Amino acid sequence: MSGFIKLIDLVVGYKEPIIAPLNASVNLGELLILSGRNGVGKSTLLKHLSGFIPPIDGIIEINNTNLSKLSIQKRADYIAIVNNKRIEESYITVEDLVKMGRYNHNGKIENDHFVEEAIFTMGIEPIRKKTLNKISDGEWQKTNIARALAQNTSVIILDEPSAFLDYPSKIQLFENFKNISKNQNKLIIASTHDLEIAQQFGSLFWHVNEGKIDQFRSPMPELKW
């Protein structure tokens, strides 16, 4: 089984399994859309893939290395993570947060072309000098994604990245993801409930239902919820 990320007999859950053993592989250049009802295990799976929590059983390999064997710093070289936990500090600007995506690469927060490209891609140039307590939920979401883009990893994992965004921004977001995954050869994994939009841009889909994951490519079949 080849792939940049490989799941080998992966059992998803905390103390009890919530998804049947999963075998799968995903390559760079894919936009993987993860769907399913609330509570079926999507966020738990993403936490396993991010290295935040160990799976109950099985192996996650990234670039032919067991994820559990990698240090936090080495994982950050491979994987950028976007969650929905908001920071509202009055002394941190939008630009400051995006720069933090570069910290793991050079030991200090520095402005460089990755920062500028991320700010441009997410369309947050007009708010770059605003502090985090002065921006909307939608602007925060875009800023947090820009931070992950600036990290310049091979893999970006996002949990509900289109939450808080208006409809045009949701479309632009997934279009950006498609272009980034294809043109920059990155693997982007995003859980979402905005399937009508995501299915227009995703290249690979995992749908969680009744403790199993159905894997397919476009066009999407009729899903069971």
Image (spheres, rainbow, N blue to C red):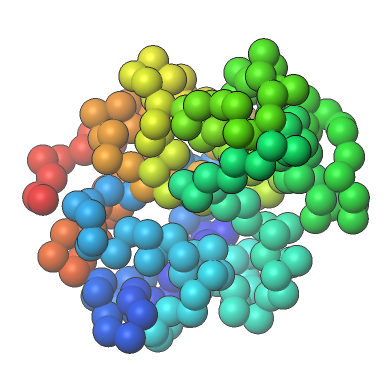
Residue 46: name its quadrant: bottom left
Asked whether the viewer can see residue 184, the reply is no
Q: Position of residue 5 (x, y in %)?
A: 52, 62
Up-down: is 212 above or below 31? below
Up-down: is 199 above or below 58? above
Give left or right: position of 73 versus 83: right
Residue 142: name its quadrant: top right
Q: Residue at x 73, y 38 (%)?
A: 92
Q: Residue at x 54, y 63 (%)?
A: 50
Give left or right: position of 71 versus 16: right
Viewer-closest of 217 and 125: 125
Q: Spot the residue most to the front.
A: 90
Viewer-closest of 88 and 161: 88
Number of marks: 0
Q: Residue at x 37, y 47 (%)?
A: 191
Q: Position of residue 15 (x, y in %)?
A: 33, 86
Q: Position of residue 224 (x, y in %)?
A: 9, 50
Up-down: is 18 above or below 43? below
Q: Position of residue 29 (x, y in %)?
A: 54, 41
